[in-house]
Image: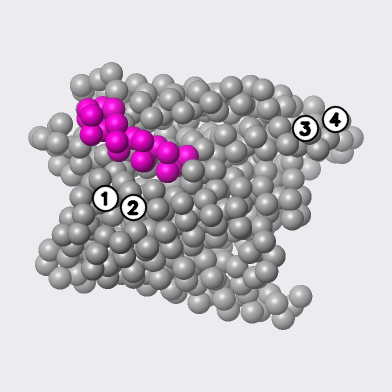
């Protein structure tokens, strides 16, 4: 049994490597934009926003499909779509075709985001679940670091080189085939001898959905704006942005590996501390007088995000009956991508209104810091209340 669980972990972790694939080309957007000079910055950024919006209906569909299809089959479909939509743009000179392929790519990412978390909830419990979820977060950040760093370097050779980095999914394809069991939900129910349980979505779950929206809406400010922030402050370029993303991912990897022990130590205060780390990181980056200070802020943000993100999904899963976990996680993933999609449309007008002329990206980072601080204080208060009840 332990050997079987170990193989399942390998499958989960290699899926996790692909889960932040949407931002894998973030540091290369300026290079892609220079190849299509007639396009606006917003149009170029659509290469990130299009997958996010496609992921939304896909995650809801996957939540329903998991009731009848094995998670292994869904994972295989997700990886294949990831490969087609990820590598395909390297062979096209049409921006419209690239956008369509990015939509295919988003469908693949959406499937993998839901299935990976559902596999954790289905196969592990208690402290082991916390550990696996933390490791999943670490591998997610590792995949992001690889794609951003290698993709940025490949983009310096040719504008379309960044898309080849998605070939990393070949490793995942092999591991999914070898490591994940092909168990249909109906077969699992018969094996346990338990009657089918009716799903139910709770009010508590919807509260966590609101929290998730703000988490990912503010988190996306970094992905969308860090390259522009460096140029605005005059302390770096797109290459420095890619390095900053790598520091962000390193922070995420470190925290992912420590998450299980940290959550046991901080208990109900864990999420509040994570939000405050995020708030502090945005202040550091907005204030940064040099690229070194900016990199420190990136590292802190990776630490904070890797505390908050697993907490969001674990709390969503714990807020509904077992039969509803798959659908709840699908909705949470939908909210994640909806928040990421909405981020520039909500934050940019606010930043333009409160920021000094020519410093709107700096203002957006301060906006993120304020939201993070408010959520951090709210979660600390909730943590104190939970501790008194315990």
- Magenta stretch, residue numbers: 143-161
Tell me which numbered mark, 4 or 3, is placed earlier along the sequence: 3
Q: Disc 3 marks which residue? A: 4
Answer few, some or many: residues within 10 Å of disc 1's Cα (few below 14, many 20 plus, some between 14 and 19).
Answer: some
Q: Which mark identifies residue 190?
A: 4
Tell me which numbered mark, 2 or 3, is placed earlier along the sequence: 3
Which residue is painted at 77% across and 29% down in the image? 186
Q: Disc 2 marks which residue? A: 244
Most extreme residue toward the right, as rendered?
Answer: 193
In what element is the residue under mark 2? helix
Work out how far the residue at label 2 is from the one at label 3, CA to CA, in angstroms: 38 Å
Tell me the quarter of the image containing the N terminus: top right
Tell me the quarter of the image containing the C terminus: bottom right
Placement of 28 over or under 182, stated as above or below: below
Which residue is painted at 43% across and 63% down in the image? 300
Tell me which numbered mark, 1 or 4, is placed earlier along the sequence: 4
Work out how far the residue at label 4 is from the one at label 2, CA to CA, in angstroms: 50 Å
Q: Disc 1 marks which residue? A: 240
Work out how far the residue at label 4 is from the one at label 3, CA to CA, in angstroms: 20 Å
Q: Is residue 151 magenta?
A: yes
Measuring from the top left, give residue 158's x and y in whole percent.
22, 27
Count the marks.
4
Which residue is painted at 23% across and 46% down in the image? 238
- The dominant secondary structure in magenta is helix
Tell me which numbered mark, 4 or 2, is placed earlier along the sequence: 4
Work out how far the residue at label 1 is from the one at label 4, CA to CA, in angstroms: 54 Å
Measuring from the top left, give residue 139's x and y in whole percent.
54, 43
């Amino acid at each position: 049994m332990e050997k079987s669980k170990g193989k399942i972990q390998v499958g989960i972790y290699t899926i996790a490597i692909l889960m932040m694939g949407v931002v894998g080309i973030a540091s290369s957007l300026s290079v892609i934009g220079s190849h299509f000079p007639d396009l606006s910055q917003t149009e170029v950024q659509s290469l990130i926003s299009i997958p996010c919006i496609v992921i939304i209906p896909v995650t809801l569909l996957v939540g329903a499909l998991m009731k009848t299809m094995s998670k292994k089959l869904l994972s295989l479909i997700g990886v294949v779509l990831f490969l087609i939509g990820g590598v395909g743009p390297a062979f096209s000179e049409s921006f419209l075709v690239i956008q369509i392929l990015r939509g295919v790519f988003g469908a693949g990412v959406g499937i993998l985001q839901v299935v990976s978390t559902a596999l954790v909830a289905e196969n592990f419990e208690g402290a082991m679940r916390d550990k696996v979820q933390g490791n999943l977060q670490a591998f997610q950040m590792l995949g992001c670091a690889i794609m951003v760093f290698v993709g940025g370097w490949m983009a310096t050779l040719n504008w379309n080189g960044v898309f080849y980095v998605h070939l990393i999914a070949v490793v995942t394809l092999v591991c999914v085939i070898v490591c994940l069991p092909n168990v249909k939900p109906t077969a699992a129910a018969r094996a346990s001898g338990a009657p089918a349980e009716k799903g139910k979505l709770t009010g508590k779950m919807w509260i966590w959905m609101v929290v998730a929206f703000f988490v990912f809406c503010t988190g996306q400010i970094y992905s969308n704006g860090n390259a522009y922030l460096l140029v605005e402050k005059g302390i770096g370029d797109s290459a420095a942005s890619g390095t900053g993303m790598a520091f962000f991912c390193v922070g995420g990897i470190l925290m992912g590996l420590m998450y299980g022990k940290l959550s046991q130590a901080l208990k109900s205060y864990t999420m509040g501390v994570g939000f405050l780390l995020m708030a502090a990181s945005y202040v550091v980056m907005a204030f940064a007088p040099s690229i070194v200070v900016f990199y420190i802020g990136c590292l802190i943000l990776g630490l904070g995000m890797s505390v908050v993100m697993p907490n969001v999904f674990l709390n969503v899963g714990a807020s509904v009956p077992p039969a509803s976990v798959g659908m709840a996680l699908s909705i949470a993933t939908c909210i994640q991508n909806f928040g990421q999609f909405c981020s520039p449309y909500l934050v940019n007008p606010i930043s333009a209104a409160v920021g000094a002329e020519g410093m709107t990206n700096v203002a957006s980072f301060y906006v993120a810091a304020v939201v993070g601080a408010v959520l951090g204080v709210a979660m600390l208060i909730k943590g104190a209340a939970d501790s008194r009840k315990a």
